[in-house]
Each structure stands twice: as C-alpha cells, then as structure tokens.
Amino acid sequence: RIGEPDRIVVIGGGISGLSSAFYLQREAERLGKDIRLTIVDGASALGGKINTLQRDGFVIEKGPDSFLARKLAIIDLATELGLSDELTTTNPGAKKTYILHRKKLHPMPAGLVLGVPTEMKPFLKSGLVSWGGKLRALMDLALPARKVQGDESLGGFLERRVGSQIMTQIAEPLLAGIYAGDLRKLSIQATFPQFAASERKHGSLIRGMQHNRKAGAAALPAVAKGGTFLTFKGGLTTVVKALDKALSGADRKLGVKVAEIRDERRVAVKREGQSSEAGVQEKARYTVVLENGEQLPADRIVMTAPAHDAADLLEPLTDVSELRAIHYVSVANVVMAFDKATFGLDFDGSGFLVPRSEGLSITACTWTSSKWLHTSPGDKVLLRCYVGRAGDEEKAKLPDEELIAAVRHDIEVTMGIKAEPLFTEITRLYRSMPQYPVGHLDNVKRLRARLAQELPGVWVTGAAFDGVGLPDCVRQGKEAAKAILAEA
Ligand code: FAD
C-alpha cells in the first residue's frame, strides 16, 4: 500500500499497550514513516491494571503502587512526558520492612537484596532464620557452581544455593509481592537471571549479589538514588493520563473487546482457491473484529492482552501452546483508612510480609501512609493488605464481608489493631499475576519465531513475556515499537 499509512492496532490499553503506542508514534516520526494507530481495550478506561482512586484526600492504588527505581525505562518515559517533577520516593523515615515469624514482626536484616543476604553481621544477628538456616545460607560461599547450563526453577536454585529456610522465610514472601507465585514453579532465567549469573560469574549467589549491589548503586542516575521505589505524587494514573494526551492522534476503542482476528490473506486464498496475491494485496493483512461487530483493518497488530486472552484470539490462527503455559494467579487487596487518633500504633517502617507457614489470610501489609507520605492526610492512617498467592487463591475470591473479616483478624493478631476503619476499598484482580514457567524464555522465542513466519506483523508483548514490573512493560513497549517498524 504505497503512500498509504500503515494501520497498526494495539490490543490492550494497559501500560504495555500505551507504551507500545507511544514509542510507535515516536519511532515512526523518527523514521519518517506514516502510521495510523488504534488502541482497543475491553475496559472503559485506559491503564489496565493501573488504577488510582482519589478519595477523601487519600491517593489509593488499587493495582500497582510504585515501581523499581533502578529499572530506568519508566523514568525515561516520565522524562519524555514532562513528568519528572511529579516523581516521588518512599518516606526516608520508613525504610524498615518487617517479616512475620512465629507470630512476631522481625525487622528485615540490613543488606538483604531480593532476599539474599549481602551484609553478614545483620544477617547473623537476625531472629528470622535459625542458626542452622544461617549456616546453610553461608554454605553458598563454598558450594561449587552448577555445571549444567539452562533454566531451572527459582525455588530449586535458592534451595540449592542458600537453603530452604531463606527460601521459605524470606525470599518467597518478599518475591510474592511481584509474582504471588510458587517459587518452585517459576523460571529463574525469566524472573531473576541475575541470581543464576551470580553463580556462574562469582561461584556464589551471595558474592554475586554483593558485587551487583555495589556496581548497581554507582551506575544509577540521581533520581533513582533517593529510594528503591518511586511513584507519582498524584498516583500511577498520572503516567496513563500523560500517555493518553501524548497519543491524542491515535484512535481508541474503549469498552469493547476484540472478539476475533481474521487473517485476510488466508481467507482470500481459501475463498478464491487459486486467487492471485494481487487481488488481496490492497486489503489489510488482518481484520480486527470487535465484539460490537466493528471491523478494523490492520497491517500490523501489537497484542498486549494477558496471555490467556491473547491465546483465545490467536488460537484459530496458530499454535498458542506457549501462551497457554503461562498461568495467572488471582489476588485481592483490601485498603483500609483509619483516624490516627483511634488507630493505636505508630509505624516506624513501610510494612510487613507474611510467609505461608504463618497460616494467615494476608500475604503482606503495606503501611501506606507511612511508606508514601503523599497518600494520606496527616491525621489519618492508610493500610493496604494483600490476599491470595499460588496455592491459596480461594481467599482472594471470598465475599466482601468474609474478606474484610479475615483481614481485620490478621491485622489484629499481627499488630493489635482493633480500630474501626473509616472506609474499606476492596479490589479483586482475577488471573492477574503471570507465572513464567521454567523454559519461558525459549517458549517466547519459539512463539515469536512462529508468529513471524505464520502471522507476520503480529507482535506479542506485555507482562506475560519479559518482566511483570511497570518499567519492564515500558521497556517491552519500546522494543515492540522498534521490532514492528523494523519489519515495515
Ligand atoms: P494489563 O494492564 O493487564 O493490560 C492488558 C489490557 O488488555 C487490559 O486493560 C485488558 O482489558 C485488555 N484486554 C484483554 N483482552 C482484551 C481483548 N480481547 N480486547 C481488548 N482488550 C483486551 N508492577 C510494578 O512495577 N509495581 C507494583 O507495585 C505492582 N503491583 C502490582 C499489584 C497487583 C495487584 C498486580 C496484579 C500487578 C502489580 N504489578 C506491579 C504488575 C503490573 O501492574 C502489571 O504487570 C502491568 O500493569 C501489566 O500491564 P500490561 O499492559 O502488560 O497488562
């Protein structure tokens, strides 16, 4: 279609879809290519999992609440969108995080990096792990590296290097915030490749993480040095709104799902038998059919829907077993607001994590008003409790009253909080946390190679593929834009 713009349909208006669209627009401008963008989302608003609620002076995140400062893609995006001044970091006075162990809150020892001890003194002093567990962890410094290359489970790796106590008492509850997963089923290469690289390069996980910690801190720009996490003062929807504005030239179809993707070349060949290519060349290669019957011609498609939705749409056209292999865990979160005067507790940190072995319904509790000062009026307290993880998802589906009762029970037994909340906000996120299985990276390569061959111009990206964190999704959006326009 010489002289005509390339019609690109982005399926999904979460951070991955919006970043893909933003960078497609940028990249097309840079390359002098003419494109016409349409963003489709089944939800009535853009943002996907990002969902900030402003209520009674509180800034409440119902989905993600912040992002890792050391992964720079989202900071770069914020800068490009003119949002640098909107960034804010965690309260420097609330650095401590606790872990529940035998019904008591223990401070996480200093120097723990993703659950791996990098400073020995505080680790050896901690009451979180027994002496046997500590000695087992230190064996990592002497154990030989695994000879076999290739993927393995994150849990298997951690048990092999630092033992099962570190795995179950510290690493799993810590990493549950990211994957809500069973570490024995998650791929190490797709989740924490730096762990495997530490063993390979330094012969020890602890030594490798000590080295990374020093090297990583030195390389960070100033904005990322202030704290581990960042967010926007007005909540994460700030970036969604800015992307929406920057994409004002793109069409959008909101509140209507994609029902089908048709490969017109196949249809044409089927209908016309020996039909010449010339007869169908003028048409777009694909038609994206919406559930209201509307048909969008598409030369290219960026698919950012969760793997199971993407699989439903692509299955009639190709093998989608790699997408079906990505399971999702359902979680819920319960936000509670209180009057400080009746709350009865002063926080000196950002919250606590709950290992499975403690037998509670909550997996973590963020002391939001203490961790993020911009989220609450000064005379109020805001808590956010997380429910549901792999193997324990039913609790996330409890009816409201039972869910609230379970959470209130847990905050009473852990912190002694009996105060009546001013209000409660429940968010259930069914099938929301993708679990990368062992072999995931090879699966993704195989899937993309098959798509390039069988469905050229269809690019799959987003949280299901190469990182679930917001910065990873932004990075992938940028990569998607490059990949798609390189094909054009
Ligand atoms: P989504 O946001 O899921 O967007 C996909 C979109 O596709 C959806 O809007 C959906 O409506 C749409 N869609 C699906 N099917 C169709 C269809 N057929 N037609 C049209 N549209 C369709 N990350 C962090 O970095 N920091 C955090 O603090 C953090 N906390 C989290 C807390 C929770 C509870 C959860 C669930 C995740 C958290 N994450 C966090 C991860 C991060 O929020 C997600 O990985 C990220 O937002 C996913 O973005 P996405 O665009 O890939 O997918």
Image (cartoon, helix red, strand yellow):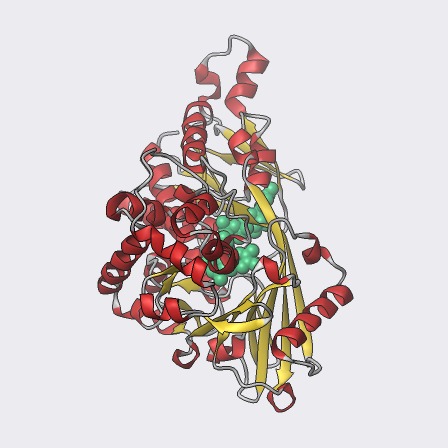
Residue at the far top: name it: 274
On screen, 89 above or below 290? below
Q: Where is residue 313 in the image (x, y as percent from the top left)?
A: 59, 34
The quarter of the displayed image where residue 449 is located: top left
Q: Where is residue 391 in the image (x, y as percent from the top left)?
A: 63, 49
Q: Quadrant of the C terminus?
A: top left
Rendered residue at 28%/43% (across/down): 200
Q: In this view, does 246 lie to the left or right of 407?
A: left
Residue at the far bottom: name it: 341
Rendered residue at 61%/63% (across/down): 358
On screen, 126 above or below 302? below
Q: Where is residue 386 in the image (x, y as percent from the top left)?
A: 60, 63
Q: Is residue 450 left or right of residue 31?
A: right
Q: Which of 109 and 97 is in front in this view?
A: 109
Q: Where is residue 127 in the image (x, y as percent from the top left)?
A: 47, 70
User: Can residue 252 be spotted in the picture?
Assistant: no
Count of picture labels:
0
Rendered residue at 53%/88% (across/down): 378
User: Can residue 210 be spotted in the picture?
Assistant: yes
Q: Which of 270 and 358 is in front in this view?
A: 358
Q: In which quarter of the image is the N terminus?
A: top left
